[in-house]
Image (tube, coloured by chain):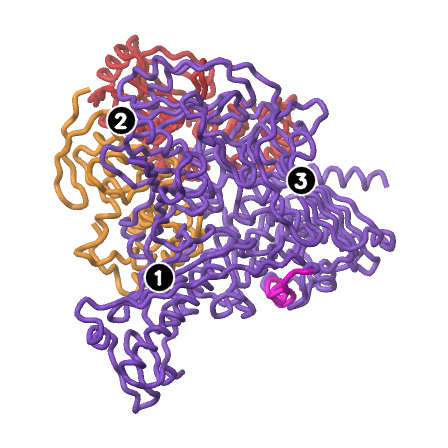
Amino acid sequence: MIPMEIDFILNGRAVTGKVSGNLLLADYLREHLDLKGAKIGCSRGACGSCTVLVNNIPIAACSYFAFQLDGKSVLTIEGLERDTTLHDLQQAFIEHAAFQCGYCTSGMILVLKAMLDHEPNPSRDTVVEWISSNICRCTGYAQIIAAAEAIIAMRANTGPTEAVS
Amino acid sequence: MSGAMRIVGVGLPRKDALEKVTGRVRYTADVDLPGMLHAKTLRSSRAHALIRSIDVTAAANAPGVRAVLTSKDVPSHYMAVYGYNIKDQPLVATDRVRYMGDIICAIAADTEEQAAAALALVSVAYDDLPVVATMEAALAADAPELFPEAPFGVVPGYGEGASAVMRPRKNVCYQFNYTTGPSSAFDVCDFVYEDVFRFSRMHHYHLEPFVTVASAREGRIEVWASNQNPFPLRKELARIFKVSESSVTVHVGTLGAGFGSKNNCKTEPVAVMLSLMTKRPVRFCLTMEENALTNTQHAAILKLKTGVMKDGILVARQSEILLDSGAYSDASPLVAEKAGYRIPGPYRWKHIDTACLCVMTNTAPAGPFRGFGGTQASWASESQLDMIARRLGLDPYDMRVKNMISLGEPFVPGESGMDSDLKEGLDLVCAEIGYHDKVKKPFFGKGISIGFKDGGGIKKAAQARVRILTNGDAIVNCSSVEMGQGIRTAMTQVVGEILQLPIERISAPAINTDHSPFCEGTNASSGVAVTGRAVAQAARDARQKVLDFAAMQLQCDASELSLENGVIVQGTGPNAQRHPMGPMVMGFYGGPGFEFTAEGFFMAPVDHRAPLESPCVFWEMGWGAAEVEVDIETGQVKVHKLVTSGDTGRSINPLVCKGQEDGAAVMGYGQAMFERMIYNDAGELLNIDPLIYRVPLAEDVPSHFVTITQQQGHGPGPFGAKGAGEATILPVASAIANAIEDAVGVRITELPITPERVLEALARKAKAELRS
Amino acid sequence: MLAIDSAGLVATSFRTLPPLDVVRAESVGEALQELRRAKRPAILAGGTDLPARFNVGDYPDIIIDIAKIKQLHAVFIDKSELVIGAAVTHQSGSTHALLPAVIPGFQEAWKKIANMRIRMSGTLGGNIMSRRTRYEGAILLAALNAQLEFATLSGPLFMAAGDLWDAELPVASLLQSIRIPIATKPRLDYERSLRPIFTQAFYVDDTGAGRLVSATEFVRPHIWAFDRNSQSNPSPEEIDFQDPVTGTAYLNQVRAVFFMRQMTRLGLS
């Protein structure tokens, strides 16, 4: 039960951390690194409010041990902005009011980021399939889908507004 | 005025947009105080039992434990029970437990892990009592009494025709009655139909859990609560812990949703008690499983006896509604009022007679849930109306139009007039699904519904304060809780329109009961229609103060002046003179500047002629239409089209209103089709696992899903607004059930509409046809 | 919720997880040695189901991380079997180029399991070892007559996927791979439109042999052997499902209806 030393990339920056075996990523981010953008909803991997991207794959941070980060790269909602410029997904969420209480929003945005990185020109069904990973109890999903579709249409015309990592 | 800014009615970015899309927003779940302890609880594993003994010795000595709370530790001078009008829920269980999940013991420790580990060392000796997990069981002659001694409670005042009584019979904590018109009206009816409907119970499934951080020290109690009604909470905590109300401070920031559940005491009393015991801040945050055990919607059985003329004219309705209130009364009496009051639907009657009973069972306490009794009532009322139309050979559309209340017509004697054109809304949703198309595909059907509730609350009072700062920037202080519905955005838009000030220059700070103006609570869709009126008044009065000041400075009449983006405009047209506020204010008050502050107040008028003693502030109408296809071999229902519509009167922010209506409709859709809490007869919640409890996902939403926001303009709120956010949950289930009968001729009277129930109904129909 | 016999319920979660040890096994042998020593081990591959265990108070004292064991990630054909490593994720497995040709219908079925987030890190091995029909892997693998290959200290142990429910596995055993016979050209149809109330997988191969696997989210899969060449069992017999939510009569009815539809889709009627 000796803390493990881990090296990983946190929102683009190399980090070394000491973590105990029973520390889940959700608590590591929120309590140790003060990155509270990942929210704890169901603590069971069902709601996806704590979704972050590890090596560009969406994972529920309540279902992932901190030590598993060793050698990997994690992106949280706090890492999505570039020099105070919002990611186009964040901008689209604002324009379409694609959130209400906001508790699922970090996770939803990151799921959609992963989707766009894996499938640059997804259909509406693909959007629905990806966001069905997470639960939004407020919006009925329509405005989230609208935000995603707006970005897909915009990128089809102009390409992404920033390099996707 | 030409060139005026349009702020109200525009889908501006929400005030909370940036903090929410960047993850910077902080909820109560994120509050972290220095030296904060963590609470966990031991909950009953029995649905109904006497507590013979509790042994906490080992737990008290476990690592990290700072306090162990059982009922023995509650000072006798506290009034350690809570509830709305009936105080029946103990802070921790005293002599008995009444449902699986009842709190028996709480521990505050340095970490949640230590608290949980210590709780595993507690032992409890129970003497099991018979369990009543259903309303039928609770009302049986030989049922055990859940409350052998009557808890303290009060019946509020009611107006014409309405009344209530506590404990009218065993295991019924409250009964609401409403009567108008002579019961002899039934005698003239051509037909009288009796039907029974069953309504299932949902878990709110708000993503931010119930959570409180409490800090009690030096005679003061301070809580950070995820709570929809900070002021009633303050009053309740002061009463429980026997301190002056002014020494309780409640902080409410942004809620990770509530849907009604986060009203009144939930996690707060235990957190405060543990903080009093430890003199340290205590965080008490539930898991999703515990959320489901803390507050739920009301399951219901609704018996409707409706008399009609053969041409479809409605005459008389007698209703008996049973609400499954669970183990503690919570808001059940209030929900009973509303379910009972709303059961006639928005139609004309000669006679209404309603009884609504709150039945106590050994299940989780039920309380407020979006729709607040209106969802239950609309399910039954709009289903039966359709059934009667079909029995009479009438089109359900025609029957509704024939009976619906006209614009301006009171719902019942003493009530306020209907403030929506009901036919206009119905025609919109009918058009969207092609209701009147005569071509009928086999196994396809269409159904419609008009959901109905009174909005704005009863005798609801709210204050607000608007402050215009030196340069014209503004702050709006009011206590409508931001829980996702966008109320802080709406309030800044109302103020922005009145002050002609961009909302970027207006802030709407979080609530602190020491400083924020009083508000009864954020419920009943009352934000804009009640608190918004106080805000609008405060904004107008603050503006007037600015203009009066400027008139004094400019030595002119205030009527010559207007305020625009922090600039005093004198005169109109090209010759208007523009005076920025800043220099003028500092010229008079000096460098530190000044604030022009005004208070606003609104309270729905009290009138004993109105049955609930307060004429309805506004009517919250939700129209729905659905097109379904039924697989008659499996009973599967595919909803091809779902259309709902609400009337916001005037949308302060159309984008926000649409989001609310989408969300309410999808919540109603989940309830219609699959979502429910499943209890067995032992009082055990079978689908407590947040994965197994099924809420709608994006993939569940019908492919043709439309919400139409009407702005009919008849609302009483600022700029003609009404409240919004609950309307479109109301009509969904009945519209779908009505569509199913249209498709395959069977009637589903119980929610959710599972394929099993559809198939059983089809089998019954086939059997009946065989016989005849 | 953790049920404590002598007291009541405690809401556990990952935040109440006691201290534990972690071993990142480099080989199957190393994992087995750790399993042999451990009291309450948990095997970590994708990890997506672990918090469900914490939430019912099932706390491991050691996590044995097998993600680095390369052989558990392979998908290949070994003679007459499709071999899927236990740590193959749903996403990489279900999109593997081998699948469509060797078992028509399997890819479509597997692609629908869980959701994108879970599919990208959840593994087929973890899915089946959680012994929850809700997770669906067990239904598909039982239909496909898959053999589960466990590594144990005394050598490999094989078990039919459908037998996992009642099996008592040696303490030191690690699911290595899932082996699906393909010599007889199996085809699969998976009907999940009623999920989670009822789902049904139907498999048939060139010899006319088949298996119908029916399940609800609450009860284990029922397996019925189908033989196209036999006239004695043309349709499945009634099952006493004992589902706590849905009635047995209904489940049998849809079972029969789905069976007929699946027969049609597989060209058998």
Residue C135: image x %, image y %?
44, 31
Which sits in the foreground, C241 or B392?
Answer: B392
Tell me, for residue B681, which label it has, or none.
none
Residue C8, visible in the rendered structure? yes
Q: Nearer the viewer, mark 2 or mark 1?
A: 1
Q: Amino acid at mark 1?
A: Val
Q: On the rendered structure, is C6 left or right of B503? A: right
Q: Chain of mark 3?
A: B
N-term mark: 2 or 1: 2
Chain drawn in red: C
The extreme top residue here reads C154
Quarter holding the C terminus of chain B is top right
Give the crowd class for mark 1: few <14, some 14-19, many >=20 residues within 10 Å.
many
Q: Amino acid at mark 3?
A: Val
Give the crowd class for mark 2: few <14, some 14-19, many >=20 residues within 10 Å.
some
- Report the magenta residues as a range: B414-430
Q: How many marks?
A: 3
The colour one sees for chain B in the rendered image is: purple
Q: Are marks 3 and 2 on the same chain?
A: yes
Tell me, for residue B476, which label it has, or none.
1
Q: In the image, is residue B92 part of the stretch drawn in magenta?
A: no
Residue B484: image x %, image y %?
41, 52
Q: Nearer the viewer, mark 3 or mark 2?
A: 3
Which residue does the numbered mark 2 point to in the structure image?
A: B110
Residue shown at 25% from the left, 20% from the top: C20
Chain drawn in orange: A
SS at mark 2?
loop
